[in-house]
């Protein structure tokens, strides 16, 4: 590995490998699981899936894939993605944080060196922010003119100095992946079966129970 001559600071090969492993680990399971949740929601609410596809057909057509420059013209699709981040909330306990000094908060002392695990689900399911919070409702992120609104209320990527480093990449990946699939395929449960339950389990991430789907090509 080449080091920067003018600085005493550099990564060893070992450090570089571990940073790459961190990025790979943090960046694959999270986005993939979010997309799995989107499939579960879209199979459970065909109206949402049809509305999304209609918007893509109207704006992008079927001659090319959606791109990031289409995003501002596809507010309903964007609202579906934001609502998936909120309700899927794949890292509900964020990451453990170490307290660097005693903190006094609402009558409690959180002592130096304590480990805290923020509960991001408490925001995702705050009924004041998101009424009927356990339902999948992309419209909650659209204002009366159909423009995106209120997406800063979701904390699925946490916040502050250690906010998810991959947030913008994840937003891009999930948007492009989902819009491309919905453009090209109808996402349905297996023939004669009901949609999978909107039920998950907490492991490395909060992920849906395993399920099958049919992707019917539209071309
Ligand atoms: C749906 C996708 C994703 C979600 C919901 C998500 C969520 C989170 C959350 C909640 C944290 C903890 C932040 C904290 O400690 O307060 C985090 C940290 C992190 N994420 Fe993501 N993430 C996603 C995708 C990605 C991607 C695509 C990458 C990189 C390619 C990535 C890289 C990281 C890294 C490096 C950290 C640690 C940041 C630090 O400690 O300074 N994440 N993520």
Image (spheres, rainbow, N blue to C red):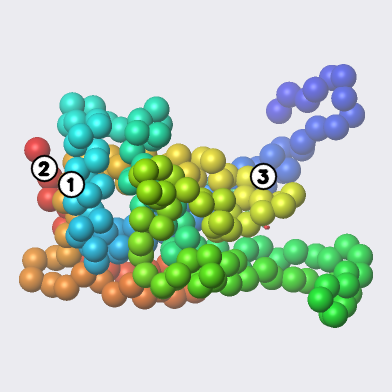
Which of disc 1 and disc 2 is earlier in sequence?
A: 1
109 vs 175: above or below = below
Mark 2 → mark 1, Cα distance in angstroms: 5 Å
- Taking depth in this image into account, of 118 and 146 the one nearest to the observer is 146
- Name the spot of residue 172 as percent of width and height, x first: 45, 39
Front residue of 210/118: it is 118
Judge by depth and name the residue closer to the eye, 189 or 14. 189
Quarter holding residue 158: bottom right
The answer to whether residue 34 is seen in the rendering is no
Q: Quick check: marks 2 and 1 in contact, CB under 8 Å?
A: yes
Q: As drawn, which residue projects farthest toward the front?
A: 144
- Circle 1 SS class: strand
Q: How far apart are labels 1 and 3 at the CA level? A: 36 Å
Question: According to the image, label 1 marks what residue?
Answer: 185
Which x, y percent locates residue 115? 78, 71
Q: In this picture, is 208 found above or below 57?
A: below
Dot 3 falls on a residue whose secondary structure is: helix
Residue at screen point 72% across, 43% down: 14
Q: How crowded is the residue under tag 3: few (<14 C-alpha within 10 Å), some, or many (20+)?
A: few
Point out which mark residue 147 bears.
Answer: none
Q: Is residue 26 left or right of residue 66?
A: right
Ligand 1 is within 8 Å of the C-beta of the residue at disc 1: no
Secondary structure beneath dot 2 equals loop
**What residue does disc 3 label?**
19
Can you identify the residue that label 2 sits on? 218
User: Which numbered disc, 1 or 3, marks the residue that appears first in the sequence?
Assistant: 3
Which quarter of the image is occupied by the N terminus? top right
Picture residue at 69% right of the left edge, 70% below the top: 117
């Amino acid at each position: 590995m080449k080091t920067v001559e003018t600085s005493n600071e550099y990564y060893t090969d070992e450090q570089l490998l571990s940073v790459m492993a961190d990025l790979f680990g943090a960046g694959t399971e999270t986005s993939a699981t979010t997309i799995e949740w989107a499939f579960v929601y879209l199979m459970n609410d065909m109206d949402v899936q049809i509305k999304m596809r209609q918007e893509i057909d109207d704006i992008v057509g079927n001659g090319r894939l959606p791109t990031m420059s289409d995003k501002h013209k596809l507010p309903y699709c964007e609202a579906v993605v934001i609502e998936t981040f909120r309700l899927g909330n794949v890292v509900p306990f964020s990451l453990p944080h170490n307290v660097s000094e005693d903190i006094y908060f609402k009558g409690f002392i959180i002592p130096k060196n304590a480990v805290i695990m923020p509960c991001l689900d408490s925001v995702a399911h705050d009924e004041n922010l998101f009424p009927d919070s356990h339902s999948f409702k992309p419209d909650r992120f659209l204002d009366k003119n159909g423009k995106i609104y209120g997406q800063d209320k979701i904390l699925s990527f946490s916040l502050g100095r250690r906010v998810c480093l991959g947030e913008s990449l994840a937003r891009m990946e999930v948007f492009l992946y989902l819009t491309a699939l919905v453009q090209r395929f109808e996402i349905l449960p297996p023939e004669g079966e009901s949609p999978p339950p909107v039920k998950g389990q907490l492991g490395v991430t909060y992920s849906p129970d395993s399920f099958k789907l049919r992707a019917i090509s539209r071309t």
